[in-house]
Amino acid sequence: MSTFAQRFDLDLPLVQAPMAGSTTPALVATVSNAGALGSFGAGYTAPEGIVERAAEIRALTSRPFALNLMVLPDEFMPDTAAIARARTLLDALMEREGLAVRTRLPERWAPRFSDQFAALCEARPAAASFAFGLLETAQVRQLKQHDIGVIGTATTPTEAVAWAQRGADAVCVQGAEAGGHRGGIDGSASAPMIGLFALIPCARRALDQAGFRIPLIAAGGIMDGAGMHAAEALGAEASQLGTAFLTCPESAAADAWKRDLVVATSTHVVTIRSVSGRAARGLRNRYVEAMESGVDELPGYPFLNALTAPLRRAAAATGRGDLMSEWCGQGVPLTRTLPAAALVRALSDEYRRGA
């Protein structure tokens, strides 16, 4: 058994990806109860909500679980001209599509990270994972004082080493095949897109050369036990699966989104910046095509993410998956519509048959 699995008392070296907006306490607890590591994506959650969600998870499981945050500045400097252009484009699109909502300027563009971090420390999950940026060394020490394992997200070997230097206990290496937001430090349009099976050994070598023997968690396109074994053969100690859990009944993904996932092909999956202002992987749908010509003039994250929120909520409520952010990874054709516990059992059976 890997050191990562031993630390978190896992029967299976599997992490359920912390998909903000799609994970629920029920999903997290069910996965943890099944012997894997459930993770709640709290990046969009207000500080008080983080404590509440952790309490809900603990009411459903006594096993370890993780919380995830996006490392962002506490304050943002908006590009007012870009925001105005985005509002014009989005409002026109919603009018054309018959949605009775319009954009608005939020009170805050995103929750204050320092307050979210304090709430996470109060919640004291077994592990905390982070995307979009590096923690300060003092923050890593603070988490460890609370006996919270620290997992950083990296999309390049250099980012993996940077997390190790900050004191992370493990690094989740996210390949280009992964669904949802690119979780690495460099979120620009020009950031490299390294495939997972090249990234794992390259990150392992970079870490070894820098003197770090911390575990790697493989993320991106893995949908079954065979994929988990392949990742381990290349140097990972565990695998993180997200798309595989989106169609579970415990997932909060909208019904229209789930329906689109089960009929999608790999060629439908593209890199998208027109939803949140940050590169993410998901289905090329009507929204993506409508915004394609103006994407270079749109504001970055979190400004665009906040502006598109009313549209995404209205689309979900009216069954318009084609106007939502239908995040998913390259392995989406391998999606299985199973309850979370049954999916973990299936993954465990496949993994053990390959052992």
Image (tube, rainbow, N blue to C red):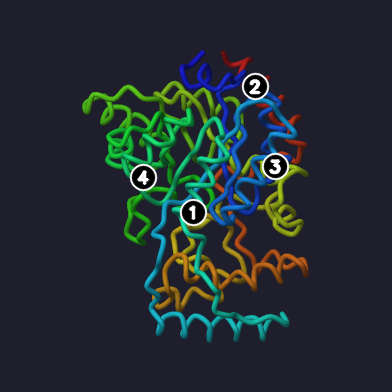
Of the pair 222 and 139, the residue shown nearer to us: 139
Residue drawn at (72%, 80%) of the image: 99
Find disc 3 in the rendering and name its residue.
25
Q: CA distance from mark 2 to mark 4?
A: 36 Å
Q: Is residue 163 visible?
A: yes
Pointer 4 with pointer 3, Cβ within 8 A: no
* Amino acid bearing label 1: Asp
Q: CA distance from mark 1 to mark 4?
A: 14 Å
Pointer 2 with pointer 4, Cβ within 8 A: no
Q: Nearer the viewer, mark 1 or mark 4?
A: 1
* Amino acid bearing label 2: Glu
| Between discs 4 and 3, the one toward the N terminus | 3
- Quadrant assignment, res 10: top right
Q: Secondary structure at mark 3?
A: helix
Residue drawn at (53%, 82%) of the image: 87
Q: CA distance from mark 2 to mark 1?
A: 41 Å
Q: CA distance from mark 4 to mark 3?
A: 25 Å
Residue 331 image point, x, y percent: 57, 42
* Amino acid bearing label 4: Leu
Find disc 1 in the rendering and name its residue.
115
Image side of residue 276 versus residue 32, left or right: left
Residue drawn at (36%, 45%) of the image: 135
Q: Secondary structure at mark 2?
A: helix
Residue drawn at (40%, 75%) of the image: 78
Q: Nearer the viewer, mark 3 or mark 1?
A: 1
Residue 330 image point, x, y percent: 54, 46
Find disc 2 in the rendering and name its residue.
350
Image side of residue 16 versus residue 256, left or right: left
Q: Secondary structure at mark 1?
A: helix
Pointer 3 with pointer 1, Cβ within 8 A: no
Of the pair 139 and 329, the residue shown nearer to us: 139
Find disc 4 in the rendering and name its residue.
135
